[in-house]
Structures are given as structure tokens and as C-alpha cells.
Image (cartoon, rainbow, N blue to C red):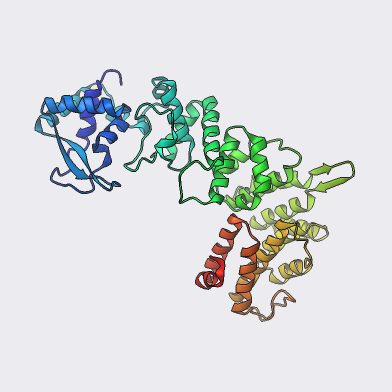
Amino acid sequence: MTDFTIGERLLLHLYRYRSLDQNEIYNIPWELTQDGIATTLCISRAHASIELKKLKNKERVVEYQAHVKGGKVKRYVYYLNPEGLKAAAEVQKKADDAGIDVKTLLDLKCQDPTQALDGMTPEDKYALGCACAFRVPVPLSILKDHKRAIVPADASGMTVINKDVRERYLSAMPEDSRTWHSFAADEWLENRVDLPGYDEAFRTVERTYHLLKAGRKSEACRIISNNIYDLMYIDDRDFLDALLTVTNPPEKNILDVLALTCEIAINVSDYKVARETAERLAETVVFEGEENEEHGDAQGYAYLAEVYALRGMKEEADKFIHLVQESNSALAKLILADILVDMKEYGLAAEEINKLTNIPRANEASVFRRHYVMAKLNLALRNEDCVAIEVSECVPEIPPTEEFVIKMLNKAFASAESRGKALVRSLAKSYGYWDMFREHGSS
């Protein structure tokens, strides 16, 4: 990289776009603007302006206005003229003769991250690290210490960093990455990230993920306990891996953390992690004060039943189903009912639901689970041959009427937190009730 001047690298960058029609004035790549050139070469905009002026004085580039992809107004863009193409071809030959891949000179994704980071100022390194920590595009404006155009961005000022680049740069400086994740967590925590397309449930997922990656595990565990239904239905392997770093959760959060780990592990089909965590949950006892204690055994048994059922191990699943049925845990029995619906054991699912008719309103998790599982059961019954199925109290008739199904969906929706609401919408849509669901005030 040090064998090539900025001017030579600029020529190589523009040379990659030599096949574009210079008469075209619409949908021009942003990389041909001054800002795009600065970002690609990891230099300041002012430096890019100086280098372009040198090339213009040498009559090697053409400057004109065009509509850029993602932009709303015309911007100046730059092309190589015949003299510039000739000069760029010579630089290309120089790189080829030296056995250097031009991409490594120009693309962040092709550079060695350790070498690239070592050549940056602390401010630029911090800005790039923070940008890489975010799992979604964020405005460049939040990177307050950003001095050079070191962070890839698009015409709207949003970062453009793919997952492979993010992971390579974060892994190159693992100690610093905790600081970068901490920055990202604070941005999500303070809701300072201006991303109107992401709802509060998404923000909760992201802030929890970054707190885990930053090592701020006590804070993450508090969020998990306070927002369990904003997190339980995600399908996110990276989140699970971050969650697994919490080996010793605070006692007041341990049951929630273990339950969430089981749920997400099942969601991503990691049945080994789900089984091991469920076994730990089943053995966990939380002491509250001198006399009260809370057990995770029944909930752990429910997850073990689900894991074995999903693996087709019916005998093992039945063993844990029986243990849940003998327990006094409303939540565990509703998890079991949900599993039984998935297994098409509709009569048994209804029996479990019908045993739990007076759940205290303070038990929000169980209240939501009951309405949700009832809605799920009734939707399933409408798509099955239910002549031989007897389900008492759970439905007014078999199959249930549309009116009753909508009523159950609305009850589930009304009792859910934001991520749970999304789950109920998804459930309704999967059974063809999406439009009617929305008409009944649940959108």
C-alpha cells in the first residue's frame, strides 16, 4: 500500500469504472463522487479534492454533474479521459508486475484488518470500530470523532459495511471491540440512533446484544428480565452466541436468562445448547428472602419435552411432558400446550389450557401465553379434520367459527408486548387471517 501514492490509487479507483458510458447522467455510482472517492481511498474529502484538482490540471479526468444512485440532487462525478486511462493502465501494470491485487489497495473488505487498523489514528480507528459494531446501517453523523473518510457510506450518509468486514475488523482488535460495542449499546439505549424504520422491539434486541458483547452483562440481564417477550421469538445465531457468554447470571435474572437461551437455541435449531440449558434450568432454584424460593424445574422440563419432540424422540418427550403435567407451574404447562399444538396433539393441548382458567393478571407471561396458545390452537383446528377431536371449553364448536378465532387473536394481541404482537400478527397471517385480523383493530 505504501508503494502507491494517493494519486495512483485514485487513478486505479476510477479505472475500475472505465466501462461506464460517460454520456449517462442517471444512476451514476456514488463511488465516482468526491465523497465516494474519499471513502474508498480512506482520505479526507479535502484531500480527495486536492488530488482530483491535480488530475484535472494534468487533463486526466473529466468532471460533470449527474444524478447519483441514492441521491436526490445532481452531484459532480469524475471519469478518466483518454490520458487518464493511459496513466491508470500504467499504474495497473505496476501493481500486476509487483503481484499486488488492486482490490487490496482500494477495498476495505479486501485489506488486512490488523494492518489497516495499525495505520489509522486513534480517532479514525475508534470511528471505524464503532461503525463495524453496529449490525445495521447507521448515520455517519453519530460517529463524532470521525476525522477522515475511513468509514464506507452511501450517498445518504449511512454506513455500508457487510457482515464479513464487520466481523474481521472486530476480531482483529478484540479488546477494543468491547469499547465499540459499548458505544453501540449506549446509542441504542439512549435512542439516539435516528433510524425510524426500527421499532422499540428491534432496539431492545440490539441494545441487549451490544451490552452482552461489551461485557456489560448485569445490564443485559436486567433488560432480558424486563423485556423477555421482546427477545424470546428472535431467530438470531449471533445473539445466541453473545448470550452464551453469560455463564453466571445474577440470581434474580437467572431463570429468565436460561429460558431465553432455551427459546433462541430452539429457534435456531441448536438442540444441543437447548437441551443443556434446559437441564440447567430444571436444576435451578432461586431463593427470594429467607423463606421463599422459585424453581425452574417445570419450565426446564417443558423445554426438554420440546427438544426431544423436535428430534423425533417421542419416548423421551413423553417423560418430560408427564413431569410438566404433574407440576404447579402455569407457564410451564402453557409452554407444553404450545408444544402439543405443534405436535398436532390438539386434545391434549386443550386439556392443558383448560386447567388454567384463573391465571393472576400479575403473571403477565402466562396471561399472554394462554391467549396466544388458544389462538394458535383454534387456527390449527380450522385447517384440520376435527370430527374426532373433542376439545371442551376451548372452542364453542369444532371447527371453531371465524368470529371466535378473531376474538382469540385479538385477546392474544392485546395481552402481548411489542415482539409478542409481531408474533401474533405472524400467526394470523400464516393461517390466512391477516386482513380480517387488521380489520378488528389489531394492526
Q: Is residue 245 above or below residue 296?
A: above
Asked if residue 180 shows in the view, the reply is yes
State left or right for residue 343 relative to residue 43. Answer: right
Looking at the rendering, in which quadrant would you find the N terminus? top left
Q: Position of residue 133 (x, y in %)?
A: 49, 35
Nearer-the-camera pick, 133 or 415 = 415
At horizontal 69% and vertical 54% (from top left) the residue drawn is 308
Nearer-the-camera pick, 186 or 179 = 186
State left or right for residue 130 relative to residue 340. Answer: left
Nearer-the-camera pick, 376 or 226 = 226
Q: Is residue 164 above or below residue 59?
A: below
Quadrant of residue 254 in the image? top right
At horizontal 78% and vertical 53% (from top left) the residue drawn is 298
Asked if residue 343 shows in the view, the reply is no
State left or right for residue 296 relative to residue 435. Answer: right
State left or right for residue 349 relative to residue 52. Answer: right
Quadrant of residue 419 in the image? bottom right
The single residue placed furthest to the right in the displayed view is: 291
